[in-house]
Amino acid sequence: MSTTVSQIDEVKTSPWSGGRSPFNVEYGKIMMWFFLLSDAFTFSSLLIAYGALRFSADVWPAADKVFQSVPGLIDHGAPLVFVGLMTFILILSSVTMVLAVEAGHRNSKKEVMGWMVATVIGGFMFLGCQALEWGHLHHEGFWWGSVPGPEELKALFTKGSEASQHLTSQEFANLFFTITGFHGFHVFTGVIINIIITVNVLMGTYEKRGSYLMVEKVGLYWHFVDLVWVFVFTFFYLV
Amino acid sequence: MSSAESHEVHHDGEHESMSKKKIWQVAGILTLITCIEFIIALAVVPSHPNLLRFANPVYIILTLAKAYAIVAYFMHLKFEKMGLILSIAIPVIFIIGLILVLTNESHHWVDLR
């Protein structure tokens, strides 16, 4: 049998002719990237809607008056302290996630395991903080469709009539709980996925497979959650 | 995924650019930027109220810097092939478009309130 092949039967090797992956990235990782892109659209739609409503309002509750407590420790007069702690926890859990990915490249099961457990703990700490924050605001009277009484609201504003203070507080409460709730739901999902991956690492699934690519894929999701928080933090707590 | 494919992805050495040292450097930058935001919000603006109008643009620039650090280094996009970088970065135009459209729209909502 002849070993020469005709031109058309030759195995194609150039990137865009089907020979190999043009992006040099495994399929699941590309799909994770495109899922995150679509998720970025969802989050930016929510945040831009918030921005548009806030732009068109004549008054808006002042962030450093609404968020000025550390639940369980300081009742008022400590703006940004608690959310600063939350931000730091989430950044740190992102760092432990990259360290898990880095350990995965060296096929070091023990180190991947340690960093994944640290990431899961970070995720739970963030969720716990968010539950306290929500509980505190709910206790003050904020919720979907409800705001504190006019006297309490007056303390959160520098100007505006009672009616406009009531209206924009309601908009603020709805947007705050919807957007941080949607983000918190992503954190919760991320923690669940991280736990599943940690169990797989422990059982040696990826060691047998020869690569810790799954850790990278969930890592992308976890960093995205951190990325969204960076924007939520700026637009709800700073601006 | 075939095992041959994973073999190829694993061995092209594209990931060696994120060392432990680099990871902690990026983490340090993210923490530093967050600290600068806190200093602006807690110390600079309360003592210099006339700087308030500069605060929001500065926050947004610092936030975008943080977003770049997370996407480029933690999510490793900077070290991927240009094709992948562009297919993720270019659709962000739609987000900018929505910002422009709804910012413009919100000016009309003022009259409706």
Image (cartoon, grey):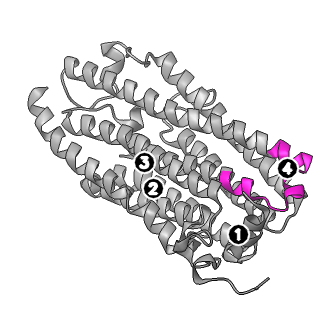
What segment is highlighted magenta in the picture?
A198-217
Distance CA(mark 4)–CA(mark 1): 20 Å
- Residue bearing the label numbered 3: A234
Dot 2 lies on which element?
helix
- Residue bearing the label numbered 2: B37
Host chain of mark 2? B
Eye-nearest disc, 4 or 3: 4
Host chain of mark 1? B
Distance CA(mark 4)–CA(mark 3): 35 Å
Q: Is residue B90 above or below residue A57?
A: below
**Mark number for residue A201?**
4
Q: Main secondary structure of the magenta part?
A: helix
**Mark number for residue B102?**
none
Name which quarter of the figure residue A173 lies in.
Answer: top left
Give the camera-side residue of B17 and A84.
Answer: B17
Q: Is residue A206 above or below residue A84?
A: below
Residue A213 magenta: yes
- Check disc 1 and give the amino acid type: Val
- Assign the N terminus of chain B to one quadrant of the image: bottom right
Does residue B88 appear in the picture of this structure?
A: yes
Give the camera-side residue of A102 and B82.
Answer: B82
Eye-nearest disc, 2 or 1: 1
- Check disc 2 and give the amino acid type: Glu
Residue A182 lies, in percent from the top left, at: 50, 33
